[in-house]
Amino acid sequence: MGIIKKVPVFLEKVPGGGIITTSLNTIFNYSQASSLWYLLFGTACCAIELMATGASRYDFDRFGMIFRASPRQSDLIIAAGTITKKMGPRLRLLHDQMAEPRYVIAMGGCTCGGGPFYYDSYAVEKGIDHIVPVDVYIPGCPPRPESLLEGCLTLQKKVKTQKIKDWS
Amino acid sequence: MNRDELAKYLLDKFPDTLELLETGKAEPFFLLKKPDGLVEFCRAIRDDVELRMDYLCQMCGVDTGENFEVVYSVASVKKRYRFDFKFPLPYNKAEIDSVQTVWAGANWFERETWELYGINVRNHGNLTRFLLPDNWDQGFPMRKDWDAPDFKRLPEV
C-alpha cells in the first residue's frame, strides 16, 4: 500500500481494513500520471538523450514510463528530434491513432520552433505545434536527461490537475 | 598512378574535353568543356582499361548565382582512383543527359538534382519526387532565388 504513504492528503484509510476511500478523480489521475507510456518517436539526435534517459543511469522506469512501439498502447508522444515537412503528416497520424487522453512533449529546439533549422531550411517544420497540440516544451539542443525528466514531471503535474468530467 | 599522373593521363587522353582546375584538393578536379559529349565521356572513362571508373560516388547540382553547375564524382573501385568533374549550365537551358546507361546508380542522384534544382534530365525514365514530400508544389528549393511563405534567410551580419 505504497500509495497511502505517498498521497496521504487525498486518501482516507478505513480503520481495521484493507479499504481506502478517495475520489475517483484522484485515483484516476494518480494512476495515469504514474504510467505515462510513451511512443517511440525518435527522429534525430534528441533520441540519443531519450535513450539515455530510458536506460539504467537516469531510469525512466521510476516514473512508470515505458516505451511502446505502437500508438494504440501509448499515452504520450515524446517527439525527440527534427520533424521535417515530410514527417509532419506521419506525426499527425500517429497522434490521432492514440487513445485519449493523449499528451505530447516537444523535446529539443527543432520541435519547439525549428531550432538550428529556423533559417535557410526548406524542409523543416518550424515547431510541431503547427501539427499537433503540445503540452510541454523542452528546449535544448539536445536537452540533457535532467531536462527531459523535469519536463516529464511537469507533465505529471498537468495530468494530476485534470478532471474526469472534462474528458470528451 | 598517383594524383598528378592520373591528372596527366586524363588530360593526354581527353585533350579537347577536359581542363584541370586548381583546387588544392587531394583528387583532381576537371572542367568538362563539352557538356554535349557527357555520356560518351563517361562511357570512355568507364571502359578505359587503365582507368575503369566503375563507380559514380555522387553527382549534384550547384547554383552559383550566375549559372548552374553539375558536379560528378567518379571512382575506380579496383584501381583506387578518384576524380571529380563539372560543367556549367545556363539558367535558360538547364538540361543534362542521363548517365544511367553508364552507371545505373545515377538514377537517384538525377532525380534529386531534378527536384531540388529544376535541372531537367533527358532520357531518365522515372523523373518523380524523391526527397521532397509527394504533394510538394513550391518549386525548386535549392535555387538561390527560391522563396516560400515560411522560409527565412539568415540575416547578413
Image (cartoon, rainbow, N blue to C red):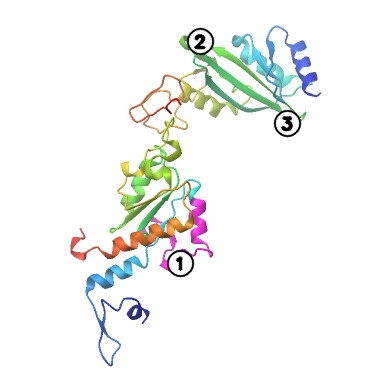
Horizontally, residue A3 falls left or right of residue B70, namely left
Q: What residue occupies the far top of the structure in this picture?
A: B16
Q: What residue occupies the far bottom of the structure in this picture?
A: A16
Q: Residue at x 75, y 17 (%)?
A: B7
State which chain disc 2 sits on: B
State which chain disc 1 sits on: A
Q: Quadrant of residue A22?
A: bottom left
Residue segment shown in magenta: A47-72
Q: What residue occupies the far front of the structure in this picture?
A: B157
* Residue beneath disc 1: A61
Q: Are marks 3 and 1 in contact (CB under 8 Å)?
A: no
Q: Amino acid at mark 1?
A: Asp
Horizontally, residue A8 falls left or right of residue B17, namely left
* Total residue callouts: 3
Q: Are marks 1 and 2 in contact (CB under 8 Å)?
A: no
Of badges 2 and 3, nearer the viewer stands 2
Q: Amino acid at mark 3?
A: Val
State which chain disc 3 sits on: B
| Label 3 environment density (alpha carbons within 10 Å; few <14, some 14–19, many ≥20) | few
User: From mark 2 to mark 3, how far is it between C-alphas?
Assistant: 33 Å
User: From mark 1 to mark 2, how far is it between C-alphas?
Assistant: 60 Å
Q: What's the mark number on residue B90? A: 2
Same-subunit check for callouts 2 and 3: yes
Q: Is residue A69 visible?
A: no
Q: What's the mark number on residue B77? A: 3
Camera-side residue: B79 or A153?
A: A153
| Label 1 environment density (alpha carbons within 10 Å; few <14, some 14–19, many ≥20) | some
Same-subunit check for callouts 1 and 2: no
Q: Earlier in the sequence, mark 2 or mark 3?
A: 3
Q: What residue occupies the far left of the structure in this picture?
A: A165
Camera-side residue: B43 or A88?
A: A88
Of badges 3 and 1, nearer the viewer stands 1
